[in-house]
Amino acid sequence: MTTDTMPQPSTADSHAHRALALIAQHRLLTTTQIHQMLTPNTPPRKIHKELAPLREEGLIAHTVLGGSHRLQAHFLTPAGAQAVQDWPELRGRSATVIQSPAAAGLRAAHTLTGVRAHLAFLTDARARGDEYEPLDWVPEVTHRLPDTGGEDRLIADAVLHYTVTQPRRRQYRAFVEIDRATMSSERLARKLISYARFHDYTPQPARRGTVADQGASMLAWQRFYPRFPRVLFVLTGASRPTLTNRITDLRHMATDHDLVTRLGASVPLGATVLEDLEAEGPHAKIWTPLTGDPEPRGWTKL
């Protein structure tokens, strides 16, 4: 028997494997969101068959969200976190274990709002033929900041990795901030200062001759990204005039704070409303630049 005719194991992961990886990456997902990510072209009821064995084996649990639709939102159990800890698609990230359905319910609003933004990018990418997969949205990415006052960490709600394929191939990365109007507008705008600090941060040199010392002259972000990711704000949870005012406040921060102005001179900064993102897609003219001409444009044109 030749190599060509010998039976070979499949190189594709099962739907159950992929579903567990998605739940591990995104922390919390509704059944509908898993269906949209995993099997959008099949009847929604089929996703229940993929999740059932994961529940039976004790790898996932769920909470029932309030509201008329009574959606189920799924999360990892300790056994599920143990199962995925060495999976290559999750390498470098620790799976988050939510301790109870009640705890899952408390974090559902912010987490699932972020997934809604991710799905808007995913749906648009599939329609355009771009390269952007369900695991290309990485939530809660942490980077150190200089510890000379203020916050000593920058925690991005998500980092997305997206490749446009036409008319020419081009890779994009973005930090994404999800705003549900639960904090003051000033506090939201201050997040731009954190990004500006990270943009300019060069770590202090270690002892001469060490491996750390060899990279000490690099800016901190250059250890993770070939180019500083653009910064995108996605707003929801308030009236249209309120959201418009919050975007205006972001623009003021970008012009009034010297550090943020310097960031905006080299890094695209933009903001949009979640409902516009879902209705029109990220390439539509829905993003308000936070510097320069305020004319709305697509996210890659910022």
Image: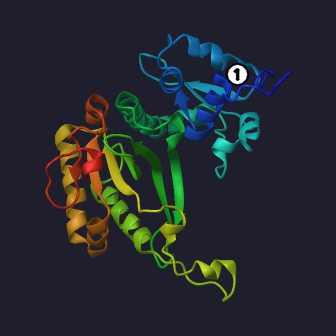
Q: Give 177 or 126, whichever is nearer the viewer.
A: 126
Q: Give 299 or 29, whichever is nearer the viewer.
A: 299
Q: Give 63 or 37, whichever is nearer the viewer.
A: 37
Residue farthest bottom in this picture? 208
Q: Label 1: few (<14), some or many (≥20) within 10 Å?
A: some
Determine which quarter of the picture holds residue 228: bottom left
Relative vertical location of residue 91 with respect to residue 64 in this rendering, above or below: below
The secondary structure type at the circle numbered 1 is helix
Residue found at x 58% / y 38%: 27
Residue 82 in the figure: left or right of residue 207: right
Colouring used for the render: rainbow
Q: How many marks?
A: 1
- Residue 96 seen: no
Q: Amino acid at mark 1?
A: Arg
Residue 59 in the figure: left or right of residue 225: right
- Residue 231 seen: yes
Q: Give 61 or 231, whichever is nearer the viewer.
A: 231
Residue farthest right in this picture? 1
Residue found at x 46% / y 50%: 159
Which x, y percent locates residue 58? 75, 26
Which residue is under mark 1?
55
Residue found at x 39% / y 32%: 129
Residue 3 in the figure: left or right of residue 91: right
Determine which quarter of the picture holds residue 192: bottom left
Residue farthest front in this picture? 2
Relative vertical location of residue 28 with respect to residue 149 in this rendering, above or below: above
Which x, y percent locates residue 93? 64, 50
Which x, y percent locates residue 24? 62, 38
Residue found at x 76% / y 25%: 4
Which x, y percent locates residue 138? 52, 46
